[in-house]
Amino acid sequence: FDPGWMMDYTPRKRDVGSQIPQESDWYELYNREWGMLFGADCCAPDSVSFHYVPAGAIRHMHALLHQCQSNEAFSRSTIEAKAQTQTYCRWEPVQQSNTTALFRGDASRYRTKCNSIDEEGVSRSASIYTERVEVVISYCRPGTGFDWIYYDILLQVPKGWNVVLTFISRCSGEKSIPDFREYANIDKVNVINIGNSGGQEYSYAKFINEFMKNPSPAVILFAKERKPIDFNWNNLGGYRNTSEMIDIASNYEFGCGIKPGPKHSWYHDKQTLHGVFLKEWKQPAKAAKSIFNTEKYEHLQDFHHRALNYSFPPPKYTPVCYGGSFAIHSQKIVNFFRSDGSKGKGVMERLEHTLSRSGQAIIEELFVERSWAGFFSEPLSAVQESKLASDIKEIVPSSKPTAGQIKIMF
């Protein structure tokens, strides 16, 4: 019962002649002693406690009550003034002592050193970073609502950051997307209609290729429509929230939205992962067998070689991010495109092309889900790789959905 519910509340209709509310309307019954006020008079200005309010809404009300000193805090003019000064950073490698956190995707191998200066004073030799996040939402289900974007994303963006919302509309549902610009930290809302082509991974590849036509410094948060992953896979351990993903990405690491299980790493044995194939997995109900694997890929490595002309970097272990939600700094995309004589650019262009072949579930989407973290993560050093090898207790076999995932000893 948040303030909005209280303002909209109206008593239920009573039986003719009855002055006593029905027992089922407990709210009205409990307030008989002192009477009820409705609309804007429902709540005292110093109200601080409400029933059954989501965690994000509680934080929002707390900010409104205790952190916003004036209307200027959320004004457009304040944001525009801040835009004149940006934060530029270098990421400096540091020795990572907490290898368990590193192997679980929670720790950074970099220290971020930043200076807030205007654009004229920027050293262009530095990697640049600005307090801005671009949220990319692969969108195809108009009936699911948009509250999760507000509570699970916008309220968890660091204070003072600007936000760009980009909806990649796959099913012509863009007319239902509201104008989020009523929120002061929303800098821009983009809607890109790609028709009924490809799925979520295709929309991400499409965005990346479009973004690289005019790249700008930002944390990029790729957000899947709200659809819980099957946590019956007991080697996955729940969600990271938006704030955690942005924090990891800000420190030049890959912020995955899904945590590994308590005894597992997000790193996978590359040889086992390469052999993953989905013949024993249940195909999605909408996926016709005739289109699911038209190229007859034998396994993930076959897909990498034939479709993308790509191989994971040299170390034996590579990270995998399940679930379709992750955050990276835009500099990682730039670096990937420039890697190996701009070979990365061709990889991403081929990726977009191969994923565009169908609006239904296809095997390529499942392979690419297991590839994003390998594309945009820094490889382990020789010392870190040796340490991970010594910690391995078990490797998930290639017949399982999380093939190659490493179970580690603590």
Image (tube, rainbow, N blue to C red):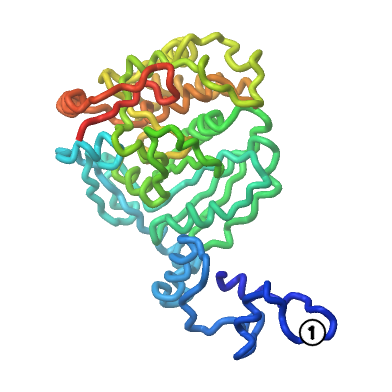
- Decide which of 410, 184 is in the foreground and name it: 410
Residue 342 is drawn in which quadrant?
Answer: top left
Can residue 255 be seen by looking at this rendering? yes
Which residue is denoted by mark 1 in the rendering? Answer: 18
Looking at the image, the residue that sits furthest to the right is 16
Q: Position of residue 144 (x, y in %)?
A: 63, 47
Q: Is residue 360 left or right of residue 210?
A: right
Please tell me which residue is depicted at 52% across the width and 30% down the height of the picture. 201
Q: Secondary structure at mark 1?
A: loop
Closest to the observer, 168 or 299? 299
Is residue 276 placed above or below 204 in the rendered structure? above
- Can you tell which quarter of the image residue 239 is in? top left
Kind of residue indicated by mark 1: Ser
At which x and y percent is residue 179? 63, 56
Residue 326, above or below 50:
above
48 or 194, nearer to the observer:
48
Residue 122 on image: x %, y % = 29, 49
- Crowding at dot 1, Cα within 10 Å, few <14 / some 14-19 / many 20+, comes out as few
